[in-house]
Image (cartoon, grey):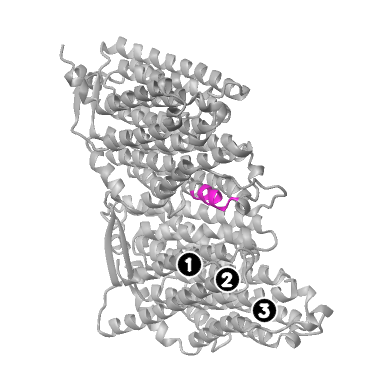
Amino acid sequence: MNFLSLFVLIPALMMMGLFLSNSRKQLLFFMTAGASLLMIFSTVLTYMYFTERAAGNAATMLFTADTVWYSAFNIHYSVGVDGISVAMLILTSIIVFTGVFASWKIDPLPKEFFLWFCLLSSGVYGFFISTDLFTMFMYYEIALIPMYLLIGIWGTGKKEYAAMKLTLMLMGGSALLLVGILGIYYASGATTMNILEIAKLHIPIEMQYYFFPLTFTGFGVLGAMFPFHTWSPDGHASAPTAVSMLHAGVLMKLGGYGCFRVAMYLMPQAAHELAWIFLILTGISVVYGAFSAIHQTDLKYINAYSSVSHCGLVLFAILMMNETSATGAILQMLSHGLTTALFFALIGMIYGRTHTRLITEMGGLMKVLPFLGVCFVIAGLGSLGLPSLSGFVAEMTIFVGSFQHTDLFHRVLTVLACSSIVITAVYILRMVGKFLLGKIQDPHHEHLTDATWFERISVVTLIFFMFALGSAPFWITNMIHESVLPVIGQLVK
Amino acid sequence: MDYSSFLQMNEEFSLLMVMLFLLIYDIFAGEKGSKYFQPIALVLFAAHTLLNCIPRDAFSIAGGMYQYVPMQTYVKTILNIGTFIVLLQAHKFLNEDANRIKRGEFYFLTLSTLLGMYFMISSGNFLMFFIGLETASIPMATLVAFDKYNRKSAEAGAKYILSAVFASSISLFGMSLIYGSTGTLYFSDLATLITASPLTIMAFVFFSVGLFFKISLVPFHLWTPDVYEGAQTNITSYLSVISKGAAVFVLFTLLTKVFGHLVTQWQPILYGLAVVSITVANVFAIRQQNLKRFLAFSSISQAGYILLAIISGTALGMTSLVYYVLVYMFSNLAAFGVISVIENQTKKVLMSDYNGLYQTNPRLSFVMMLALFSLAGIPPFAGFFSKFFVFSAAAQQGYYVLVFIALLNTIISLYYYLLVIKAMFLNKSENPIEVVKSDFPVKLSFVICTLGILLVGLFSTIYDQIGLLSFGM
């Protein structure tokens, strides 16, 4: 146990606080206090990380700690962070913080909602700080199961169907993953489940052929890889605002992070040999997701399909297996996390006012909701990759990296994936044009009120970080770049 | 003759004393004394549990008829805790006017079956084993038919006794074949004498049917849903946890100790049984509306998962098995406890009756949810750890495909467990179940189960303790 475990302990303490509180005021107090604490803590962690690195500490993982848990299976509770995890922890803190403000008026059963919300976030935090395969998997599952109740109780639309579908598909993914993890552990002959230690060993290539696809697909399900993406549109569309934000913003990143940290890092040979299959699948995700988004009329479905496309790009970039594209992939995780959370937050706020999410039934909302409208446009521009917003940096890095491959196969796929940017522009601009601009369609919409203070906090925070990442990316790219090197080094060996 | 060595059978004698005392007390106690019958019984049983939870050194008495290894203490303690929880949950039911007169019998019969299981676990000879098996199953049939004016209960009792006797006679036939081919019934001698000849293989197959019946593996499970549904709910929970737990442990020790030479024969058999049990039970469970039948099928599939630990045949598998039984006990007893509390007061057992339960009974729904999540293997609850260890034990021996099939089945099982959770939390109901009142012992049992579900996984000491002893097996 070291101070990194605070990331899991603070949500646990928040849950206790929630248990004891009996009014909405107290609930919100505990939630905002805890979320702010997590924000501050991740800032402090980033600062410590930089000072440690500046002092010349070149270890793969910093601040590691290790406690024996189940000795019979060599399960340790081991934690540690590198640049990628730090970036992900910052992202999680931002989304949790803004998610609390976005669910300020959640109804019914606010206490239960926040309890599950805290459990979900503790799972996500735990996943990013773990360096042990078992604890990683455990936290992964902890993050999955609250989704069922969160969507089922507080969702909208076909919520029961969507909740069941999402839970079962993601659990299916984790079943593949568990076989993969057990395979890695026993096939490597390791005497530990620590990822860093297993990476030093060599897993026989024929075993890698079995377990790489299992592990990659297992995580890929959560990363919305085609054809296992179908949970995402239904799930995200039905989930309550804060849950959509956290799920699309952070939870889907668990998939990409896991693919990179576990599947590719531990089984590099098979990754080399089999990457083409997954490149094709993720390539389909990227293009197909974007095309599907064009066709949708429900705001949440549009954004959910756009998430499929953008998260596909993360996996796509990881599979390109060079430093630049891998750095781009991590940047894309951050960028997509922020953008999509902002989108979902805004959609939730607009839906709360208009009670419809169909763009065909809305129009001219910019006139009545100027603040939300402008923020929506900013989110859209960030998503389609406007320079100075985060999306541009990420996509640029990814495609620069992908173009380093000169063979025909990679070229064709890269060009296809690039085309998704154009398609993104189509659906974003069409959506903005349809429901924000033009004439007001429904007379009831003329008297809507603009964002309240807590909604503004949530939105402005997200936009601030989008700008920060987009205009001054160097501080975070350096951190990410030096941390992808060990994995890439393993891959090119 | 020197009988002093008999006194080494601590557990058995102490349980026998509790039983006899309760029987006599029940007969002679007056109006006033009978008020204290249940508290005294519970305290005595708790004392019995505590006194016998420290492992001793291994020994064997009565010429090898009775063999003790330290691991058995843990298994017996797990059974004791389980029985204690069942007795706590039955407290209210037995205090009702109609049942007060039958309390003594209830305790005596329950503890007799437990005594039978003790002997079954510690037996060193097939005869002893058979006596234990029968002592465990015949009072059990009486217990199943305990509610004799209820047609379903009486029917369930008849079904249970008929199929149990059939199964044990086949088992007995298998034992006779073993005796015929080797000339002895002592486990220690058989370990070397049994070789893979057709006769012994046949003997093994016949013999094991009796145990498979007890564990209720597919295709020996057909009695399970009917009996579970018909029996009084506390008996059902006893049947599904204690009886099953004892049988799986015995199966493991017999397979490794006695039939060790037949390992190439029994591994494929268990492989097939595991796959079939898990899959068939899961598919059937999906369509159940009666929650007792539902949990019956769920317990069949849980037994299938336990086979994964048995099939590994290693010390790791042994530890995982005992640990799995412990966790399964807490989770299943919690689930059955909720059902029994609600059934006792409202007579409602259908899943549709549970709609909107969270609105009226938030605590009960919470316990039920924990239990189901633990059964489904969701972290951070104990069921996740026990499942992981069982799978890990099988994967260590290279059974990746089996683990994969089992894991796919956990998704199906998650689906039907979520159906119950959906009914309780998501569905709305016009007339939900009224606020259910439960007395102190029932609450205590829920506290024990909840703590078990929450803490057994997070603290590895329990697993390590079991693991220390499993290497001697």
Q: CA distance from mark 2 to mark 1?
A: 20 Å
As shown in the figure, which amino acid type bears the numbered disc 1? Ser
At numbered mark 3, what does the secondary structure look like: helix, strand or loop?
Answer: helix
| Label annotation for residue A355 | none
As shown in the figure, which amino acid type bears the numbered disc 2? Arg
At numbered mark 2, what does the secondary structure look like: helix, strand or loop?
Answer: helix
**Point 30% across, 12% down: residue:** B179
Q: Identify the chain of the residue marked 2, using the numbered disc in the image.
A: A
Q: Position of residue A197 (x, y in %)?
A: 27, 62
Q: Identify the chain of the residue marked 1, using the numbered disc in the image.
A: A
Location of mark 3 (residue): A428
**Point 44% across, 34% down: residue:** B87
Q: CA distance from mark 2 to mark 3?
A: 37 Å
**Point 59% across, 74% down: residue:** A104
N-term-proximal mark, 3 vs 1: 1
Q: CA distance from mark 3 to mark 1?
A: 30 Å
Q: Nearer the viewer, mark 2 or mark 1?
A: 2
Location of mark 1 (residue): A121
Location of mark 2 (residue): A24
Q: Position of residue B25 (x, y in %)?
A: 39, 24
What span is in magenta? Answer: B361-370
At numbered mark 1, what does the secondary structure look like: helix, strand or loop?
Answer: helix
| Residue B431 is at least partly visible in this image | yes
Between A113 and B303, the one lying in front of the other is A113
Same chain for the residues at labels 2 and 1, yes or no? yes
